[in-house]
Amino acid sequence: MQSFECDIVVVGGGPGGSMAAKYAALGGLDVILIEKRAEIGAPLRCAEGVSKKWLEEIGVEPDPAWISAEMDGAIIVSPSGHTFKLDESHAGNEVGYVLERHLFDKALTEQAGKAGAKIWMRTAATGAIIEDGKLVGVHANRMGEEIEIRAKCVVAADGFESQMARWAGLDTSLELKDLDTCIQYRMANIDVEPNYCEFVIGSAAPGGYVWIFPKGDRKANVGIGIQGTKCKLGADPKVYLDKFIENDPRLKDGTVLEIVGGGVSTCPGMEETTADNLVVVGDAARMIDPITGGGICHACRAGMYAGKVLAECAKSDDFSKDALQPYEEMWRDRMEDKLWRNWMAKEKFATLSDEVLDNLVLAIKDSDIKEVNVYNLLKVIKDKYPEIVDEFESMI
Amino acid sequence: MKVVYEKCLHCGCCVGSCKQNAIYLNDYVLEFNDSCNKCRRCIKICPVGALSLEGE
């Protein structure tokens, strides 16, 4: 069996893995990033909606090549059809772009390669190499050949599947209530608002929501997420989405160009994202926002932090859990409070009836909310329906 | 486990939801290892209903 050695092996070529590889390589480390698929960013597993502000934070210039459409705002639709439309001045930082994820991901991987990381496509991690109780690398299959890649530290960036961390001994498993199962159709020939992301809440999508994210020229990603505990029918996401589309005159005669599935975690993040010689980033570390289901910006940030911390660790050649603590601190300082607050809000919202959700949307509509984000929406709800937020009031 | 590949989207939802880490998505094929305890989580959450227990 062929054996390779490097400083850092990154498992997964999504945004989190590419950012980690980039920043570790910029720090002078010998990095191998492995991606099991034959193409970065494909097949798609994403609704592709992101806000704008964080790109600057991770040092990425917006590029028209991977921006499918720019949003002017968002529309929240209540169960009985009350709408709350947020125009640009009110849309705050929760709306922004709808991406071409397969091109966005490639751009980030390209940057990692430019920084010096080696990118190995069609190379799937198949297990952890553990010797004397220590993680020392990964078993992999590279284009049909069993290999091992020995490294001082492993970055687990393998997305929702999150197997690498588990092979290495960290439990990243989810409770059913803390995962949403999703399906999405890329649709064409539909008459949706071209520059507004639409969110439909309530029993149309138990414990989750329906999204319509426009992709220009009468196209959109139309998808649904349903809370794991609320799945009853077998194929719930498909059943609910088909029903939704059938009942929406704008969509029912549309053309489906692509069907994608996927899982989303809706928990507040893992308790531990580091172990000796192991860092977990992005969806694999369950860093997805439990309300919006958005995970790209969190993965990018965490990947960047991980890469920078790994470069620091290399100076003392110490990749122990203790040495990796700055990574835990950096991502938690930046994101953890919000993840917890939104997780608590999700827990509550998943219990609300359509009637209450209707009233909430009306309350938000009547408010003079200036900038719309989850925080401000919760504040409005707190003023009018304090009982809904009483369990996490202190976080608003 | 039985997989109806005509339905499967290869999305990995079952893999990430498996408490036992018993499922491996090898390209377009799902592999189940011995640690599967037939808890049915993957069956329940599969977005297209592609999974069932053998013999059911």
Image (cartoon, coloured by chain):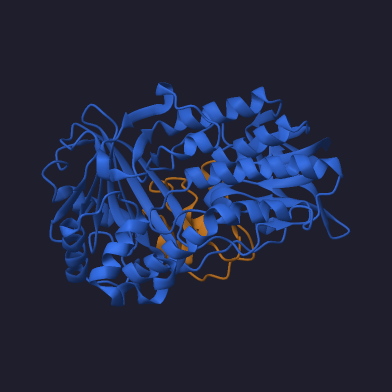
In which quadrant is the N terminus of chain A drawn? Answer: top right
Determine the residue positioned at 51% across, 71% down.
Answer: B39
Number of numbered discs overlaid on the protein picture = 0
Chain A, which colour?
blue
Q: Which chain is orange?
A: B
Residue A252, position as x, y percentages in the image: 15, 43
Say whether residue A25 is left or right of residue A99: right
Judge whether residue A351 can be spotted in this image: yes
| Residue drawn where x is 32% and y is 63% of the image | A379
Residue at 36% of width from left, 35% of height from top? A97
Q: Is residue B25 left or right of residue A373?
A: right
**A123 to A62, vertically: above or below:** below
| Residue B15 position within the rendered picture, expressed as x and y whole percent measured from the top left | 54, 55
Q: Nearer the viewer, residue A47 or B31?
A: A47
Q: Nearer the viewer, residue A173 or A105?
A: A105
Relative horizontal placement of residue A107, taking residue A395 as reference (left or right): right
The quarter of the picture where residue A357 lies is bottom left
Please state, as top left, top right, bottom left or bottom right, where the C terminus of chain A lies in the image: bottom left
